[in-house]
């Protein structure tokens, strides 16, 4: 609801795709710097408590947006500042959230657990826009932002039911900077993780901006407003939830590596079909497939990276994964927004989709063994023992 309300607000007030893209980029910009810090902190403290503190901060920022909207003081600069602060908080807590999932489920169920996590997130993308469209039509952005603020109570309630397992790893916590460096060395030295990070960067920069540019597509291309934006966002959520329900059986049948390869190969062409759709309803149909492939691709990348490291490193590897998303999405959504104002929304987005396909094909041809290394071993390697990837290929550099 917050994403839709702010997207429609910024696009309506400014009329520029550049502004909408910039606001979205500010949410992910902190990940460029803070992701490794968040990962190292999450490996130092009890993850449940750490997440609870971050959730309280997120709720306070949401409350500030709500108060500004109700008092008529909500402006684009205010949205930009709070979006940036939200990005900082999200960046610091997301590695802990991802690692907590890995901590409470066995390795063989991790892919399904990550898929279900994506499903609940995308159910919000289905229900939220539908509710937001009604609320925006009747009460305006302020009421949508109020519901978002209250929703954080549900997050705190859920965390209270998770059994705390304390801090993972050794009893003596690793210093912050050496901990960050250790996570980076592991990622750099593992052929599979290196490829995963590069793939995540490409997806985030060239494909993921479709999420932030939905209001621009609905308003500027199809000349419609909040209802059309809600339709597209909801359709993407439907695709993601359907994919989440199917991923477990698909992984069992085809294997994690093969499924990930096909998702990365298909997501570029499907993104191009979405941006080239001549009508809103065809665009909604295409974004169902795009949402499914986007969710499946990121789930596969994230799960594979988590399964290749011991538990005391999972938050740090997750933070590097988040950093790749932050770097790619920040640059991609801002640049695509700027270029969309100058050369057209369809032209720049379709070009990026085709470029993504070309890059995936190039990596597949040049680094076939790195793709093979993304198939995680059945058990974690022990601290101090050789990385599983070293047995497959050796150091992987890109």
Image (tube, grey):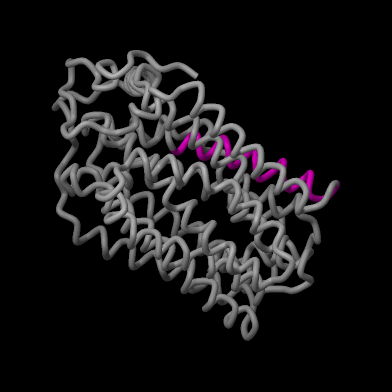
**Would you place residue 6 above or below residue 23 in this image?**
below
The answer to which image quadrant residue 76 occupies is bottom right
15 in the magenta segment: no
Residue 180 appears in the rendering: no
327 in the magenta segment: yes
Q: Residue 210: image x %, image y %?
A: 62, 53
Q: Residue 354: image x %, image y %?
A: 66, 42
Q: Does residue 57 appear left or right of residue 12 in this picture?
A: left
Q: Does residue 100 appear left or right of residue 25 in this picture?
A: left
Q: Does residue 188 appear left or right of residue 166 in this picture?
A: right
Q: Residue 145: image x %, image y %?
A: 55, 69
Q: Residue 71: image x %, image y %?
A: 65, 72
Residue 307 appears in the rendering: yes
Q: Does residue 174 appear left or right of residue 14 in this picture?
A: left
From the image, give the main secondary structure of the stretch colored magenta. helix
For the image, the number of numbered tags is 0
Q: Residue furthest right?
A: 342
Q: Residue at x 16, y 49 (%)?
A: 164
**Would you place residue 216 above or below residue 97 in this image?**
below
Query: 295 or 32: which is nearer to us?
Result: 295
The magenta segment is 322-342
Q: Residue at x 45, y 44 (%)?
A: 262
Q: Residue at x 32, y 47 (%)?
A: 97
The answer to which image quadrant residue 43 occupies is top left
């Amino acid at each position: 609801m917050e994403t839709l309300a702010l997207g429609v607000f910024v696009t309506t007030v400014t009329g520029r795709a550049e502004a909408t893209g910039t606001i979205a980029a500010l949410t992910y910009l902190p990940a460029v710097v803070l992701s490794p810090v968040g990962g190292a902190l999450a490996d130092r403290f009890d993850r449940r408590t750490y997440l609870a503190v971050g959730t309280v901060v997120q709720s306070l920022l949401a409350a500030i947006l709500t108060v500004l909207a109700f008092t008529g003081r909500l402006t684009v600069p205010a949205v930009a500042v709070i979006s940036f602060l939200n990005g900082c908080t999200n960046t610091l807590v997301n590695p802990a959230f991802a690692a907590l999932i890995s901590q409470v489920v066995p390795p063989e169920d991790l892919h399904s657990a990550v898929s279900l996590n994506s499903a609940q997130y995308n159910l919000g993308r289905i229900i939220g826009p539908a509710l937001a469209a009604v609320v925006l039509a009747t009460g305006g952005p302020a009421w949508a932002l109020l519901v978002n603020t209250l929703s954080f109570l549900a997050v705190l309630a859920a965390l209270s039911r998770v059994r705390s397992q304390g801090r993972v790893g050794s009893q003596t916590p690793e210093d912050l900077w050496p901990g960050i460096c250790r996570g980076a060395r592991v990622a750099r030295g593992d052929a599979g993780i290196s490829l995963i990070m590069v793939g995540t960067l490409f997806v985030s920069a060239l494909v993921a901006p479709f999420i932030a540019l939905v209001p621009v597509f609905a308003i500027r291309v199809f000349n419609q407003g909040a209802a059309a934006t809600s339709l597209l966002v909801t359709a993407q959520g439907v695709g993601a939830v359907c994919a989440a329900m199917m991923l477990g059986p698909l992984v069992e049948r085809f294997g994690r590596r093969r499924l990930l390869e096909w998702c990365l190969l298909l997501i570029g062409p499907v993104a191009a079909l979405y941006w080239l759709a001549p009508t809103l309803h065809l665009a909604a149909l295409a974004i169902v497939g795009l949402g499914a492939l986007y969710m499946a691709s990121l789930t596969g990348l994230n799960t594979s990276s988590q399964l290749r490291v011991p538990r005391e490193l999972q938050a740090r590897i997750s933070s590097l994964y988040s950093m790749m998303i932050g770097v790619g999405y920040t640059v991609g959504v801002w640049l695509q927004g700027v270029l969309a104002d100058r050369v057209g929304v369809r032209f720049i987005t379709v070009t990026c989709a085709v470029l993504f396909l070309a890059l995936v094909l190039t990596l597949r041809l040049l680094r076939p063994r790195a793709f093979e290394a993304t198939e995680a071993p059945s058990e974690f390697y022990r601290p101090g023992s050789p990385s599983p990837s070293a047995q497959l290929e050796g150091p992987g550099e890109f």
